[in-house]
Structure formats: structure tokens, C-alpha cells
Image: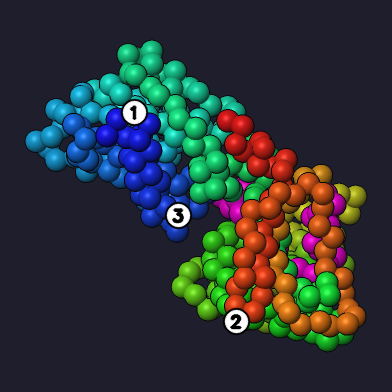
Amino acid sequence: MQGNKRHQFYMNRAFELALLGKPKIRSNPAVGCVIIHNDTIIGEGYHRDFGGPHAEVNAILSVQSGDMYKLMEATIYVTLEPCSYIGKTPSCANHLIENGVKHVVIGCLDPNPKVRGRGIQMMREQGVNVEVLRYAQTNANLNPGFYSSMLHDRPYVTLKWAQSSDGFIGQKGQGSMPISGQKGRHFTHTWRSEHHAILVGSNTVFEDNPRLDVRLVEGESPQVIVLDRRGRLTGNEMIFSLGKEVWIFSYQIKEIEHHRWFTVDPSKPLIPKVFETMLAHEMNTLFVEGGRQIHQAFLEGPMWWDELRYFTSREKLGQGIDAPAIPADCTPYIREDIGDDEMVILRSKQTWQNFISL
């Protein structure tokens, strides 16, 4: 293989590896690495665990002892710029230098503005030939939470709802109304498992009494967050009986045993405090499943959302609660039929322009 085709082939393999680490790396980016010598893979690795060795280190560890001398003649493919700083782990850029690597191909720059380009500079100053490809979109698709926390200082926020064909998400006083079909519900549980936290308002808790956990697919249930401005929750609702701590954000001072109550200054909005608390706990993806009021609060905030996912059923309700208004700052991402429903995913133009401009 030559040139761009070679780069594409091995970088695609590196991204396949990166995806394997997603379940256990928390707020860290998923990164993969492949080591090539004479068009033969002699080592590969990915970031496996939060706080554990990065992809480059694991890839070098995978090289057979008898092949270590080949590193000086090898090409390293890594999906994201090797880190230049010492944090929970040593500098990966320095690790490559110390192991005699002379050629590194990088998917894209680190989105962190404080360190962006420093790993490349460090390696080039030590004589390493560094090539930077244009895989920002692929990296952002894989690591939206990491990109959002680095560029926007908040989690990546996805809003989800289901609506009837005539544009209603439910009917007042009717409690939980299943609008999407079984396949749509499976998608919803998969999405829950892919996010660090799930958020609803207290109205949804009282009207639907949901579990907000992952049951229909394998995966870990997200941290449950409830916005309860007036402090109405009692601790007797379903979400408090599932053995996992619930976070409540409110303007009132209150406690619910075995759960966390965050009291916010009434002069300030609740949502930024949620963002701040999540990042402090190494969480950078938020799934919002509330009603119209909660969704509109995110949509009308100062860049408080990134992605919209909704199902439209074939059924009509005739009247009820209007679905959230779709903002103008949207770009289509996915539209397809899922069973009897249509699934639509839209993305914020501003968010994704920021992500892929690196």
C-alpha cells in the first residue's frame, strides 16, 4: 500500500481499537494505536481503563521483545495527538521518544486548547517525523464528551423524546404514555448506557414515576439527575428504590437519605451547576429525557445542547403536550425508519463546527 491508502487502512484499524475501550475510560478519550514495520503490524493497543496506560504505551508493551529494535524503523499510527504532560499517566509523546520512534502519524490534534500541538512539538524537536491527518470528525464522533469538556467546559448534551405523528409528546395528567415502539425503546436503553448521566425534571418523576435505568440491553445505568426547583421530591419515588444514588438539584434546602441533594443559589440557573458537578466527577456526557419544559430550558440556554434525538410514531394523539421546538441551529445527522417509528438525529451546527475545525 502507498500514501493515503496506507494511512487510511492503518488509521481505521487504530479507530477500531479505540472503540474497544469506550466502556471503561470514563471522561478520558478513546484512543487506539497501531505499530507498523514493513507493512506488518508488530504491535497495537488502546486506552483500556480510566487512569490506566494510554494507547501508545499499551501498543509498545504488545511488541514482542525480539521486535523492539524495529521501533526505530516503524511507523506509529495513533488516533489522537500523544499527550505531552504528566497526569494520571506519564507523557505519551515522551514515551515514544524514549523508545526510539522516528515516524508518527496522528489522526488529529488534541482538542484541549491548553496542550494542543505540544505533543507534536515535543516529538519534532527530538527529530521525530510527525504527520497530522484530518480525522477530527471521526475523533469527535467517538469522543463527543471529551471534546465538549475541552472546548465548551461542559458535558456533551443530548436531548431525547418521542412524539406522535401530529407533534405531541404526551397528554396532561395521563402519566407515562409509550409512544415509540419496542425497537425505539431498545435504542433508548442503548443510548442511556452510552451516557454518564441521565436528567429529568421533577414533573416527569411525579407523572411517569420512571426507573431511568438500563434494562433492555447490556450496559451500565447512568447517574440519575433530577431538577427539582421547589424541593418536592420525597424519597418514595421509584428512582430512589433502585440501590443507586440519585442527584437532586434544587433551590430548596433538603435531604433525602442515601442520596445527594445540591442546593443552588436561587439567583442562578440549575443547569450550569449540573454541568459543573458532572465534570468534577469525571462525567462528560448527559442524556436528557425530561418533558417539554426541561427540553426547552436546555434549548433556550446559552449553548446548553449539542444533539437532538427523537422518534416519531405513526399514531396521532389529536391533542396534548407539544413536542419541543426544533431550533434553527441544526444539521441533519441521521434519519431512518426504526420499526414503526421514524428516528431523527440532529446536531448543533455551532458545536460541531467547533469540534471539526481542529
Mark 1 or mark 2, which is nearer the start of the sequence? 1
Q: Secondary structure at mark 3?
A: helix
Mark 1 or mark 3, which is nearer the start of the sequence? 1
Q: Which residue is mark 1?
A: 3
Between marks 2 and 3 in the image, the one whose residue lies nearer the viewer? 2
Q: Residue at x 38, y 38 (%)?
A: 8
Q: Residue at x 90, y 50 (%)?
A: 267
Q: Which residue is mark 2?
A: 182
Name the spot of residue 342 as percent of width and height, x first. Answer: 67, 70
Mark 3 or mark 2, which is nearer the start of the sequence? 3
Work out which residue is located at the far left of the displayed protein and give it.
66
Q: Secondary structure at mark 2?
A: helix
Quadrant of the rendered structure where residue 259 is?
bottom right
CB-based contact (under 8 Å), mark 2 and mark 1 = no
The image's mark for residue 22 is 3
Q: Amino acid at mark 1?
A: Gly
Name the spot of residue 27 as percent of width and height, x first. Answer: 53, 49
Residues 252 and 107: in front is 107
**Where does the magenta region start and end?**
277-301
Residues 228 and 260: in front is 228
Find the distance from the CA under tag 3 to the CA under tag 1.
30 Å
Q: Residues within 10 Å of mark 1 (few under 14, many from 20)?
A: few
Q: Amino acid at mark 3?
A: Lys
